[in-house]
Amino acid sequence: MNYFDSIWVFAPLLFTVAFLYASVGHGGASGYLALMAIFSFPAADMKSSALILNMLVSLVSFWQYLKGGHFKWSLFLPFIVTSVPAAFLGAFIKPDPLVYQRILGVLLIFPILRLFGIFGVETDKIQKVNLPLALVSGAFIGFFSGMIGIGGGILLSPLILLMHWGNMKQTAAVSALFIFVNSVSGFSGLLLSGVSINNEIYTWLLIALAGGFAGAYLARKQFSTKFLRMLLSIVLVIASVKLLTIGR
C-alpha cells in the first residue's frame, strides 16, 4: 500500500496515533513507525520522520501534564542523564533492515500491552527511585531509542509503573519530556549522519499536532478512549506481525 494513493486512510490513522499516545504522555514514534511499515514507507525516511513527529507531540503532551502539576524532576533526572548521550550515539547505528524491522516489531508489543492496561495498574505505595538502576536503564533505553527512531517512552513507562516509582499521571508527565529530549538527541545524531527528511513531513506535523493537542487535553478531562485504543491496538498488532514475519 502506497501513502500517496492512501492519504484518506493514512491521515485519520496518524491523527488517532498522535491522539492516543499523547493521552498517555507518549510522543507516538512507535505508532508512526508502525503506520509507515504498514504503508510501505522507504526505510530511509522512517526514523527521521518518526522522531520529528515525536518531538512535537511529546512536547504538547508534556505541557498539558505540566500544567496539571504532575511532573517530578526527581523522577526525570536519573534517567535523562545517561539516555541523552546514549540516544545521540545510537542514532549513528544503522542496523540491517531486517534486524531493524524485527527489533521494531518486538518493541511494538510494549505499547500494545500498555493500551490493554497491562502496565496501567495504579499504586498508592510510591517507592524511591533506585539510582543505579535508573542510570543503567536510561542508557539502555536511550541507545535503543536513537538506533530505532523512537523516544523511549514505551520502555520507560512500564519500568516506572512496575517499579512503583510514580503513579500514572507522574509517569505520563516524565515520559513525555523524556521522549522529547531523547528525540531531539537522536534526531541531532541523524542529521550529523547525513539522513534525509521526507518533504511530506509538514503535512504530517499538522495532523499529528491536532491529534496530540486533542489527546493530551482530553486525557486531563478523563475522556474515555476505549474504542480508539482498541483501534490503535489492532493497527499496532498488524504492524508488529508484519515486521516480525517479513522475509519468512
Image (cartoon, rainbow, N blue to C red):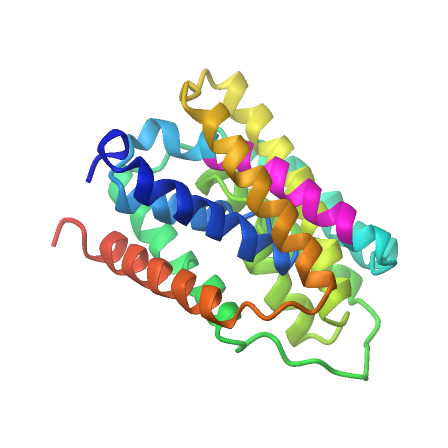
Residue at 37%, 28% (x, y): give it.
Answer: 45
Residue at 27%, 41% (x, y): give it.
Answer: 39
Q: In this view, does 74 lie above or below 166?
A: above
Residue 36 visible (yes or no): no
* Residue extending furthest toward the bottom: 124
Q: Residue 112 appears at what percent x and percent y?
A: 44, 66
Residue 156 visible (yes or no): yes
Q: Is residue 103 above or below residue 221?
A: above
Of residues 151 and 59, which is closer to you in this image? 59
Q: Answer with the quarter of the image where residue 248 lies.
A: bottom left
Is 214 covered by the magenta stretch? no
Q: Residue 40 appears at what percent x and percent y?
A: 24, 38
Image-based side of 121 in relation to 196, left or right? right
Q: Answer with the quarter of the image where residue 71 lies.
A: bottom right
Q: Answer with the quarter of the image where residue 238 lies.
A: bottom left
* Residue extending furthest toward the left: 248
Residue at 79%, 61% (x, y): give it.
Answer: 131
Q: Residue 37 appears at what percent x and percent y?
A: 30, 44
Of residues 183 and 67, which is closer to you in this image? 67
Residue extent of the magenta highlight: 50-64
Q: Is residue 207 above or below residue 123?
A: above
Image-based side of 12 in relation to 6, left or right? right
Q: Is residue 153 above or below residue 143?
A: below
Image-based side of 67 in relation to 120, left or right? right
Split into 4 quadrants, where in the image is the N terminus?
top left
Magenta: main secondary structure equals helix
Residue at 67%, 53% (x, y): give it.
Answer: 216
Q: Residue 191 appears at what percent x and percent y?
A: 53, 19
